[in-house]
Image (spheres, rainbow, N blue to C red):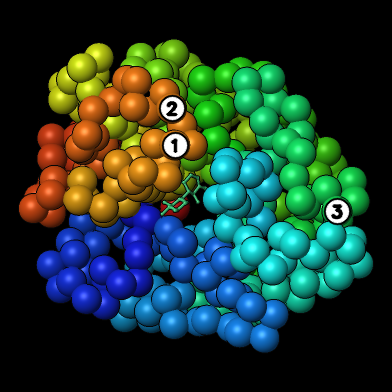
Amino acid sequence: MGAAVEADDLAGNAAYADAVRRHFTSVTTENALKLSVVRPSPSTWNWGPADTIVDFAAANDLEVRGHTLAWVNESGSQNGLPTWMRNLSDPGEFRAAVFESVTEVVGRYRGRVDRWDVVNEVFEYPVGLPAPSVFDRLGPDYVAELFTAAHAADPDASLWLNEVFTELFPAKGDSLVALVATLRSRGVPIHGVGLQTHLTLTPAAPNPGSVSGLVTRLRNLGVDVAITELDVPLGPLRSEQAQVDIYRQVATECLAAGCSEITVWGVSDADTTLDSVGQRQNNPLLSTFFSLPSTPLLLDVALQPKAAYAAVVEAIQQTPNPTT
Ligand code: XIL
């Protein structure tokens, strides 16, 4: 059971650090391992934030999901690449910068980051076509190449593809399954698929079976599957009880179909990115359906577990044969 965390909060807020220790078993680097943070200029490596998170996890026996080496679909300019790298229009220079960074970052945390979201958000929605992206400069096979490079840098790390809104758009789920099937059949080192599960585009609950169906299809391809960025905002069309029910539904479906992890996108309602101006600009439906503050997470602003937290824990406890 994981949460996305930020280094500043872990280092500067003892109550936050304590809540992470107490209520979660895994942490995801919310921003600290995006190349925009790690490599702000060609010659500057900024390891401080990621080191803080990885060291905290080691000291407290938490697992680490390293997020994310290549965020493909560009929502606004928030794809995690530093401007200087985005601006390398020469394909050879762009390629060198990306692969050098992947090798350096994964290699530095070899043995300390358990799983990597190597590639994030490959498809557009709703129909699931490949998203046009600066990563197209790497040529048509860049997804496989990125996995291969990450595997070379840490052969023991579990390597994941992470995707968004698959519970809402079946065609996107189909594209994801097809891509993973191809990568697996080619022997590309991909070991897991993350379903972000930001439930922010509609106040309705996910269709029953939309999570478990996809988890099952992906597991049948021989990969692990996890919910990696869950948040369930509130608003006039979604009540607190609906939030609890949706958390329970998603967790139960995911676990019943054999998923290995449920991670939420932030520690408490005080640190959700959904209330930020940037997210609201990128996703206008957020402001249409969900109020401010959207209180979408499992701990309240005082870092106390909400009813939704208890619902997820219950779902975990009631899973007959939890995977590890
Ligand atoms: C978000 C962070 O939460 C924000 O702080 C940052 O400004 C932008 O990125 N999908 C992802 C995450 O895979 O990396 C995004 O995180 C949220 C959507």
- The dot on residue 137 is 3
Residue at (28%, 25%) from the top-left corner? Answer: 290
Q: Nearer the viewer, mark 1 or mark 3?
A: 1
Residue 223, given in percent of the width and then of the height, sits at: 64, 44
* Quadrant in the rendering for residue 26: bottom left
Circle 2 SS class = helix
- The dot on residue 281 is 1
> Which amino acid type is marked by label 3?
Arg
Q: Nearer the viewer, mark 2 or mark 3?
A: 2
Circle 1 SS class = helix
**Do tag 1 and tag 3 residues touch (Cβ < 8 Å)?**
no
Residue 186, given in percent of the width and then of the height, sits at: 87, 47
Q: Is mark 3 within 8 Å of ligand 1?
A: no
- The dot on residue 25 is none
Q: As drawn, is 179 to the left or to the right of 302?
A: right
* Label 1 crowd (10 A; few <14 / some 14-19 / many >=20): few
- The dot on residue 284 is 2
> Which amino acid type is marked by label 1?
Gln
Residue at (57%, 43%) from the top-left corner? Answer: 76
| Foreground residue among 72 and 115 | 72
**Do tag 1 and tag 2 residues touch (Cβ < 8 Å)?**
yes
Give above or below for 130 relative to 272.
above
Give above or below for 169 relative to 50.
above
Residue at (13%, 67%) from the top-left corner? Answer: 15
> Which amino acid type is marked by label 2?
Pro
Q: CA distance from mark 2 to mark 3?
A: 29 Å
* Quadrant in the rendering for residue 294: top left
